[in-house]
Image: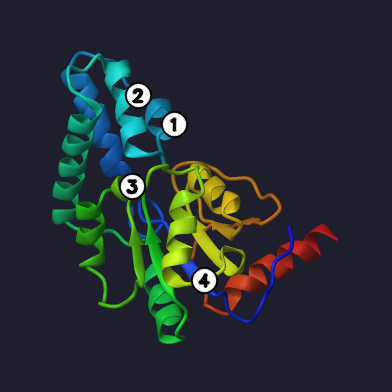
């Protein structure tokens, strides 16, 4: 796959949960509490297996695993409500995210939020950030196919008027990274709950702390040189 590179990407497409904000503990806690309340068994591996997943797919898994007498949409509504409560108690931004978001915006590079969380939850997070950071917000309840399908990232790129091949996706989960790669974008993986492995088009870093806008494409140039 060939990419047209420039000093800055055409757009930056951001995942939310685990990438911008550390909500994964809230999701995992809500999932476990729901299953245990109905007498089921839940493990850390169950929670990790759902990171980055479409919420209805996750809910179907939770329903079966916990033998829960609720429909998947009901389970999703419950989980979203629990996470919203958690956010209301305080927000933990991932290191370096706020600085990079604001710098990219100041340089005029379009940005989108691309999350499997639903619109209400995404808006609660966006509302805690400076206005105007995102030119598009794509949520899990507004796409037909969730991650790892490319639809969410293709939709975001289209709404920004950008070529996906000239965009950088920033993700924390393997499912989200797969969605970005399938859309044809470069993917910068910053693992949170689940480890990632570098591959063509995907660079893994430990943190966004200290990462500047000018570093985004350079990270992929460095990865190419490392493989030569």
Q: Is residue 150 above or below residue 154?
A: above
**Mark 3, residues whose alpha carbon is within 10 Å: few (<14), some, or many (≥20)?**
many
Q: Residue beneath label 4, please?
A: 162
Instruction: Give the CA separation, mark 3 to mark 1.
Output: 18 Å
Asked if the residues shown at circle 4 and circle 1 are in contact, with their CB atoms under 8 angstroms apart, the answer is: no
**Mark 2, residues whose alpha carbon is within 10 Å: few (<14), some, or many (≥20)?**
some
From this viewpoint, is residue 96 visible? Answer: no
Marks 4 and 3, the one that precedes in the sequence: 3
Image x and y of residue 192, in percent: 45, 48
Image x and y of residue 210, in percent: 50, 73
Q: Nearer the viewer, mark 4 or mark 3?
A: 4
Instruction: Give the CA separation, mark 2 to mark 4.
Output: 35 Å
Image x and y of residue 33, in percent: 21, 28
Pick the residue in front: 136 or 125: 136
Q: Residue beneath label 1, please?
A: 49
Q: How is this picture coloured?
A: rainbow
Pick the residue in front: 155 or 65: 155
Q: Residue beneath label 2, please?
A: 61
**Mark 1, residues whose alpha carbon is within 10 Å: few (<14), some, or many (≥20)?**
some
Asked if the residues shown at circle 1 and circle 2 are in contact, with their CB atoms under 8 angstroms apart, the answer is: yes
Instruction: Give the CA separation, mark 4 to mark 1.
Output: 32 Å
Q: Residue beneath label 3, please?
A: 140
**Mark 4, residues whose alpha carbon is within 10 Å: few (<14), some, or many (≥20)?**
some
Marks 4 and 1, the one that precedes in the sequence: 1
Question: Which residue does the image show at 29% across and 78% down from the upper left?
Answer: 132
Question: Which residue does the image show at 52% across and 78% down from the upper left?
Answer: 213
Q: Which label belongs to residue 205?
A: none
Q: Quadrant of residue 126?
A: bottom left
Pick the residue in front: 139 or 58: 139
Left or right of 37 in this view: 184: right
Question: Which residue does the image show at 33% across and 57% down from the upper left?
Answer: 21
The secondary element bearing badge 2 is classed as helix
């Amino acid at each position: 796959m060939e990419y047209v590179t420039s000093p800055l990407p055409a757009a930056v497409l951001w995942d939310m949960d685990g990438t911008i904000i550390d909500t994964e503990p809230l999701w995992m806690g809500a999932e476990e509490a729901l299953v245990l309340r109905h007498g089921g068994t839940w493990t850390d591996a169950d929670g990790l297996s759902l990171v980055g997943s479409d919420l209805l797919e996750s809910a179907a898994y939770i329903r079966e695993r916990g033998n829960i007498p609720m429909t998947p949409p009901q389970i999703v509504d419950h989980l979203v409500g629990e996470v919203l409560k958690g956010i209301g108690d305080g927000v933990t931004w991932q290191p370096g995210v706020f600085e990079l978001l604001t710098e990219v915006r100041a340089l005029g590079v379009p940005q989108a939020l691309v999350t499997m969380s639903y619109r209400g939850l995404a808006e609660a997070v966006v509302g805690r950030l400076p206005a105007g950071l995102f030119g598009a917000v794509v949520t899990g309840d507004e796409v037909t196919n969730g991650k790892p399908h490319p639809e969410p990232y293709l939709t975001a790129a289209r709404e920004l008027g950008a070529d996906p091949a000239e965009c950088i996706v920033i993700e924390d989960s393997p499912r989200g990274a797969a969605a970005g790669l399938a859309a044809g974008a470069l993917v910068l993986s910053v693992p949170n709950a689940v480890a990632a492995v570098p591959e063509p088009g995907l660079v893994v870093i430990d943190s966004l702390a200290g990462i500047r806008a000018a570093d985004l494409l350079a990270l992929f140039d460095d990865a190419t040189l490392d493989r030569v």
